[in-house]
Amino acid sequence: MNSIHAMLAAIATMLLITAVPSTSAFTVLEPTALRTASTMASIPESSMNKAFARQQTTFGDRSRIYRMADGDADVGVADPNEMVARRIVVTGDVQGGYYRSCVANEAGRFRRLKGTMTPPDDSKQAEIYVEGKRKVVDGFVRWCKKGNVGLSQQVKVEEVFDEVPTGLHDTFAVDTGRE
């Protein structure tokens, strides 16, 4: 009897997934919406939890895998287009114009991030504040963690802090120390 319920749940899931129109817009089917669908009203809750333990939904050329705990909403799935901000503390040869120009190019020109870098001073430390889409900001943090830029610059990321995006910056601004 349980295997019949599981088969019915799997068939209903496939029907619901294929019934979603394939457009460039990204629509999220929540598990609660699937549970209340009229085609699945007769299936017991325990069978549906097993059927939805791992579900893949496809919309056009985009797909996401939902991981659910006892039928709850997706756990641990971060939206790559969500606006986020990070404050990156770097140490080493960070006060020179070459490193600062590389940061400006990487963040501002190549990744189109917004933010700023602390002005040059006599310390061996600088802070970089960036905001933008999660996937782009995460890529920039990975670039910073690569460390050495150029032939002689030794740079290390000390800490990365999550911040709340403020929207105060229109571009990425860096003072390279040139007058």
Image (spheres, rainbow, N blue to C red):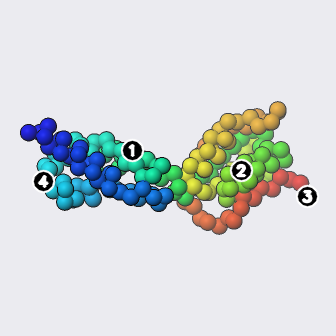
Q: CA distance from mark 1 to mark 2?
A: 30 Å
Secondary structure beneath dot 1 equals strand
Give the amino acid at mark 1.
Ile
Query: Does the CB distance between marks 4 and 2 fall below 8 Å?
Result: no
Residue 38 appears in the picture as rendered: yes
Total marks placed: 4
Q: Which label number is shown at residue 93?
A: none
Return the x and y of residue 52 as percentages of the image width and height: 27, 45
Return the x and y of residue 158 as percentages of the image width and height: 64, 40
Left or right relative to 5: residue 72: right
Residue 116 appears in the picture as rendered: no
Crowd tier of the residue under label 1, counting other residues whose Cα lies within 10 Å: few below 14, some 14–19, many 20 or above: few
Give the amino acid at mark 4.
Ser
Image quadrant assignment for residue 151: top right
* Residue at the farthest top position: 151
Q: CA distance from mark 4 to mark 3?
A: 74 Å
Q: Which label number is shown at residue 110?
A: 2
Secondary structure beneath dot 2 equals helix
Give the amino acid at mark 3.
Glu
Secondary structure beneath dot 3 equals loop
Of badges 4 and 3, the one in the foreground is 4
Instruction: Return the residue at label 1.
Output: 65
Q: Which label number is shown at residue 42?
A: 4
Secondary structure beneath dot 4 equals loop
Of badges 1 and 4, the one in the foreground is 4
Crowd tier of the residue under label 3, counting other residues whose Cα lies within 10 Å: few below 14, some 14–19, many 20 or above: few
Of badges 1 and 3, the one in the foreground is 1
Instruction: Return the residue at label 3.
Output: 179
